[in-house]
Amino acid sequence: MMAIDASFFLEILQVYEVQEGPRVSSRMAHLVDHAGRKSAHHAILRDLVMLENQIPRFVLKKVLKFKLPALECAKDKLLSMFMGLCKELSPFKMNDEDMPNMGVNIQFSTVKPEDDSSSNGISKPPKIEEITIPSVSDLSKSCVKFLAGGIRISDISFNTETGSFTLPITSLDGNTGVILRNLVAYEASSVSGPLVFTRYTELMNRIIDTEEDVKLLREKRIIVNHLKSDEEVANLFNGMSKSIRLTKVPSLDKVIADANGYYNGRWKVKMRKF
């Protein structure tokens, strides 16, 4: 049964393979619509990344070896297919140089690791501090200007002189919720250092309270909304569960501190004038 599932999975992945020239023909191509108009397209992509549908990487490699002459060829082809899938699913716009790293992340977050032993014996995490920062609406009322800039989480910044809050462009559709949760889960289980992606989702969770916050970010072209409403986007981020362990990230925490300082300073000035 797993061999059959793996074969089906590879047929879908083949449609997304990164390569020069036209895509390789696949028997599943009729189900995949790159414009995202077919309901089957969304359903298949959503199923591919659900945790209950994980398939061990070594199974995919072994099945792929029947078509290819060597194991290295199978590894390269598998990575290429996951990179293409990543570009299709990623909520962030991606440059060519981002593809290899993001491709690996998507591969590990959508396919069960071959060895789960590293997750054993984890000590109890320290108590978590929730992010404290005003919503987009409240920040805007304090003359904070939101700007769309960059495609990476590392591009997030706050300019204390101009009050400019720069956030990466994020595209959201029906598959985004599953993707975000899987990436958060992957990062929590595989990364020993700061949980950068998790901290990003926590930041978005805190600054987005209502559909009005989403509307403001959408009007600034920070959020590209392919969902039915701004309310759905707000529910998506508000529904993200909190991290299971400490997620302090110095670069993002400085941005949060700078935004809070600017906001509090503005309100103090207003109170003094009052």
Image (tube, rainbow, N blue to C red):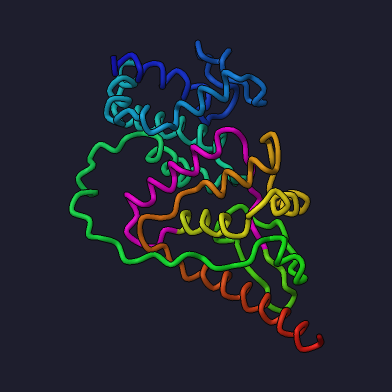
Instruction: Residue at 63% x, 66% y: name it.
Output: 134
- Residue 245: x and y in percent read 35, 59
Please report the bounds of the magenta region as a residue range.
Answer: 166-195
42 left or right, relative to 120: right
Nearer to me, 138 or 61: 138
On the image, which quarter does residue 209 sit in?
Answer: bottom right
Q: Is residue 58 left or right of residue 202?
A: left
Residue for point 60% across, 61% down: 155
Q: Quadrant of the N terminus?
A: top left
- Residue 126 appears left or right of 241: left
**Location of residue 183 (image quadrant):** top left
The C terminus sits in image quarter: bottom right
In the image, is residue 177 part of the stretch drawn in magenta?
A: yes
- In reply to whether residue 46 is colored magenta, the answer given is no
Is 29 situated above or below 266? above
Task: Work out whether 64 lies above or below 123.
Answer: above
Horizontal and vertical percent position of residue 243: 41, 55
**Image point 22% across, 60% down: which residue?**
123
Left or right: residue 31 versus residue 107 is right
